[in-house]
């Protein structure tokens, strides 16, 4: 298998730590540069992360003593591409990512700054791999030969969009979703967010807008070098922060043009697979969508590591007296929803020759 050298920009953060962990012994990607802000540059990775290390396993041996480098694209070591997960303001993030692309270093991003650009593909690899076609137009806009930006979607919608996707054939008309989001989604642990203990915070800045809008880009079509957003379904989202370390839960109600039966829905979920499964990509879950029959599942604590945290789970499918059907969705927010989803996207890009 061909190997690519990789930089991680924002390597000391919550998502960056996931990248560092996931890329240990990765068959295709070799992390050669761990980058962060100027505050961390020059320190060893272990020193720069310090008390912030939030993964269940210790810092991988390969990373511990690596010197954290500056995130300046002009001085960046030679890599085939970078993963980017930084907590900068939107304009600064967009400028940083474009700067990497203009220095001919492709960017696979976890940040939201470039998600709504029509020629930046926002990809859930099982759902819309065909959107990668807009990269040619983006390269023309940026004036690059190989540099480009590809993004993954917000973590919240990965707990319900994958489950709605195979049901589109029944005509999704309206969706009401309430997400119950883990604190790692805010880059926090219980130590750094004590106010969440015994509490629910009914506001996550910008999250409801992203949860309502991003699915329409994911279900959009490639037209004239850009993505034209889908017009349906109408989506109403409410997003709450809850005292869970990892894993976003979604309570979903759906109205269809042609109401399917319970068996239709379960069969559509059970049989759904995407390109990552067909290509056998290393981070692809063997089975993307799982339905759990027990009435008290899925649960973050019990189910978040299903298929390496890359599977999406559903439970409690039942008829809805206002909409047609309702169910519970679930995904691991920093694995499928962030770093794992980005690694899978990079594997897809590599398999299709975008880093060559
Ligand atoms: P975080 O824990 O706060 O980490 C932020 C990272 O950005 C740190 O490595 C920090 O380095 C680095 N950084 C700050 N300023 C920088 C600069 N000027 N140049 C380069 N690096 C800089 O944040 P996070 O939770 O990992 O989130 C990162 C991004 O991923 C955000 O855009 C977030 O919205 C997105 N995201 C997060 C999740 C999630 O579940 N957490 C899910 C999806 C998307 P220092 O250590 O040196 O300060």
Image: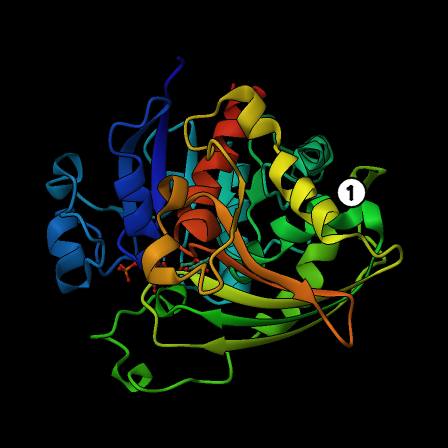
Relative image position of residue 15 (x, y in whole percent)? 36, 54
Q: Is residue 210 left or right of residue 342?
A: right
Q: Is mark 1 within 8 Å of ligand 1?
A: no
Task: Determine if residue 92 is in view.
Answer: yes
Going 38% across and 61% down the picture, which residue do you hit?
Answer: 300
Going 55% across and 33% down the picture, which residue do you hit?
Answer: 147
| Of residues 321 and 255, the one drawn nearer to the viewer in this rendering | 321
Relative image position of residue 84 (x, y in whole percent)? 43, 47
Relative image position of residue 237 (x, y in whole percent)? 65, 73
Is 275 situated above or below 67? above
What is the crowding at mark 1: few (fewer than 14 residues within 10 Å), some, or many (at least 20)? many
| Of residues 236 and 76, the one drawn nearer to the viewer in this rendering | 236
Regarding mark 1 in the picture, which secondary structure is present there? strand
Task: Determine if residue 118 is in view.
Answer: no
Q: Is residue 253 left or right of residue 304?
A: right
Q: Which residue is mark 1?
A: 226
Is 328 situated above or below 26? below
Relative image position of residue 31 (x, y in whole percent)? 29, 33
Ligand 1 is found in the corner quadrant, namely bottom left
Going 85% across and 57% down the picture, which residue do you hit?
Answer: 231
Within the image, what quadrant is residue 268 found in?
Answer: top right
> Which quadrant of the rendered structure holds the N terminus?
top left
Q: Is residue 343 left or right of residue 37?
A: right
| Of residues 29 and 328, the one drawn nearer to the viewer in this rendering | 328
Going 70% across and 37% down the picture, which residue do you hit?
Answer: 131
């Amino acid at each position: 298998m061909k190997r690519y050298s990789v930089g991680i920009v924002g390597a000391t953060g919550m998502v960056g730590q996931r990248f560092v962990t996931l890329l240990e012994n990765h068959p295709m990607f070799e992390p050669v540069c761990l980058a962060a802000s100027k505050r961390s540059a020059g320190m060893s990775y272990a020193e720069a992360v310090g008390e912030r290390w939030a993964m269940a396993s210790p810092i991988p041996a390969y990373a511990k003593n690596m010197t954290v480098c500056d995130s300046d694209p002009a001085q960046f070591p030679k890599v085939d591409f970078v993963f980017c997960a930084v907590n900068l303001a939107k304009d600064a993030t967009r400028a940083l990512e474009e700067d990497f692309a203009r220095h001919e270093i492709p960017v696979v991003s976890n940040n939201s700054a470039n998600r709504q650009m029509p020629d930046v593909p926002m990809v859930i690899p099982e759902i819309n791999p065909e959107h990668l076609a807009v990269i040619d137009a983006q390269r023309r806009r940026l004036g690059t030969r190989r540099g480009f930006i590809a993004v993954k979607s917000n973590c919240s919608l990965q707990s319900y969009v994958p489950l709605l996707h195979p049901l589109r054939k029944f005509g999704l008309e309206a969706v009401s979703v309430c997400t119950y989001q883990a604190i790692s989604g805010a880059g926090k642990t219980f130590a750094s967010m004590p106010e969440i203990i015994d509490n629910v915070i009914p506001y996550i800045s910008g999250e409801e807008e992203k949860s309502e809008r991003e699915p329409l880009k994911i279900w959009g079509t490639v037209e004239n070098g850009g993505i034209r957003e889908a017009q349906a379904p109408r989506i109403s989202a409410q997003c709450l922060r809850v005292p869970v370390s990892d894993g976003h839960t979604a309570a979903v109600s759906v109205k269809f043009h042609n109401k399917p039966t319970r068996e239709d829905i379960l069969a559509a979920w059970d049989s759904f697979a995407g390109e990552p499964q067909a290509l056998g990509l290393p981070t692809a879950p063997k089975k993307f969508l799982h339905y759990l029959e027990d009435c008290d599942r899925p649960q973050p604590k019990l189910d978040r590591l299903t298929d390496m945290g890359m599977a999406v789970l559903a439970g409690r499918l039942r008829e809805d007296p206002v909409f047609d059907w309702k169910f519970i969705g679930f995904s691991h927010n920093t694995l499928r929803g962030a770093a794992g989803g980005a690694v899978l996207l990079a594997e897809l890009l590599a398999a299709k020759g975008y880093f060559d």
